[in-house]
Image: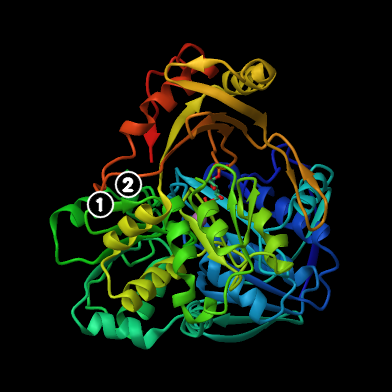
Amino acid sequence: MNTNKVPTKPFPDQKPGTSGLRKKVKTFQQPHYVENFVQAIFDAAGDPRGKELIVGGDGRFFNDRVVQTVIRMAAANGFAWLIVGRDGLLSTPAASCIIRKRRAFGGVILSASHNPGGSEGDFGIKFNASNGGPAPESLTDAISRRSSEIDTYSIVDAPDVDLSRLGETDLGGTVVEVVDPVSDYAALMEELFDFDRIAGLFASGFRMRFDAMNAITGPYARVILEERLGAEAGTVTNGEPLPDFGGRHPDPNPVHARDLVELMQRDESFGLAAASDGDGDRNMIVAPGMFVSPSDSLAVLTANAHLVPAYSGGLAGVARSMPTSRAVDRVADSLGIDCYETPTGWKFFGNLLDAGRITLCGEESAGTGSTHVREKDGLWAVLFWLNVIATRGMPADEIVRQHWKRFGRHHYARHDYEGLDQDVANDLMQDLRDRLPDLPGRSFGPLTVESCDDFAYHDPVDDTVSRHQGVRVFFREGARAIFRLSGTGTSGATLRLYLERFDPSPADDAAGGGEPLVSVARAAGEISELAARTGRGSPTTIT
Ligand code: VG1
Ligand code: CO
């Protein structure tokens, strides 16, 4: 079998963002674009010879082509063994699970996660290291540097590997093993949770709805929820992974999965509704009559972790991304454990998890996870909720209300301003940073600024420092506003404005969210001159 060394020229735009390299499909379809980036990964990640690599993706448009390219290039670069999900499919948490289980060198995951798919949509490639987690910043920087100087890549001359059948194929000395994408992951879930108890809950007539959004989690949810746990047939909806996700935006939030929120308002026979995103690492939880904000969900799961077999021995600590509400901080305080605050993006949790400093972690963007893998994990979070509901014998909305009574409530919302001009967005952030020293003591409507800063993270494990991770403004009245620019978008700039306000003795109703945050949003708007600079009177999306 021939190995070709193909001459190439660098592309200027191959710097990974919050989670891998994400671009329009059309960008990835340029000749050599995929190959350059994959070679940059292999060059930066260390000597691949004789090692094992995990390969799979979320099934979006172009997944089937790129997976074959990665296989041919991995063979040419000397990997000994490739584990590929059947049909080139693997959810992000399942890939992480398999990397860890096989003690592999790492994994290449093909996904643009919650971004839309289809030929006009987005594609992405990310590398996970041998701990199963997203490449840390030092490695993504090295990949980006390598991509800017690359002049050849290696690829074997071979026909496509048949990925529809399980088993092993030899590709010029490299074994390509096609595996069932679900089985290792399902086995891990069975170790973590009390499956008998959850099955008992379903047997007693508990109903739920899981919307897989025609993305990767369909096959996982069907096997685990319907086949193993006995949830009624039809529990999993939109369960077929489709290249364009059925035309929907696979981002599980109250906007893109509104029908779930409506279902839980309308139909009292359901005890829980949930959804996941394109690559299966996000979770949306809807209790009867109530959307559970991801920040609240992290706090509730932390407070109830002792009820789940895997976490019954106690938690080492917890972590949340900086914009995530401080609800979990209160729980950590009452448990007497550390709570770390990291920049946005899962890669920052890796060191804390590896060092045994934390057991659970999460983000406001519907990501929750634990030491069981090194990625956030959508279905895991749903099983966690089911385990807690089954053990406490209490409806999910009641669990949340009791939580608020005990700890107080952090009202929370995220306002996204999408498709902004890049320069306008950059200037807004820069001017905001410049004005920070003047803000403390100033009042904006009923709120007075207590303190503010440009968030920098000092990793306590490896001492690296990540600066400019978002501007934080704290108000005396228990409110907080955070500004940062998205690192996952593929056109223009997205400004994210995160609003939070603490209420120590919340009313019993589920609504909230909006009203207590109006004055925080106004103050944030004034401080940043948002409307004047962007010309926008309101956000594109509120979640
Ligand atoms: C967003 C979220 C962040 C998440 C990231 C990847 O990043 O805010 O919390 O980790 O997406 O999620 P950004 O930079 O656009 O704010 V996924 O499920 O798209 O890999
Ligand atoms: Co995702």
**What colour scheme was applied to this rendering of the protein?**
rainbow
Specify whether 268 is left or right of 143.
Answer: left
Type of residue at label 2?
A: Pro
Where does the N terminus fall, quadrant-wise? bottom right
Label 1 sits on residue: 261
Return the disc, 1 or 2, that comes first in the chain's sequence.
2
- In the displayed structure, 514 sits above or below 427; it is below
The answer to which quarter of the image holds residue 5 is: bottom right
Task: Answer with the quarter of the image where residue 273 lies.
Answer: bottom left
- Cβ atoms under marks 1 and 2 closer than 8 Å: yes
Q: Amino acid at mark 1?
A: Val
The residue at 68%/53% (across/down) is 348
Please provide percent x and percent y for residue 75: 74, 72
**516 vs 260: above or below:** above
| Mark 1, secondary structure of its residue | helix
Q: CA distance from mark 1 to mark 2?
A: 7 Å
Visible residue check, residue 208: yes
Q: Give the camera-side residue of 135 and 453.
A: 453
Q: Position of residue 107 (x, y in %)?
A: 67, 67
Residue named by callout 2: 254
Q: Residue at x 14, y 59 (%)?
A: 267
Residue 5 seen by the camera? no
Query: What residue is at 23 percent from the left and 67 percent from the top?
Result: 271
Asked which secondary structure carries label 2, the reply is loop
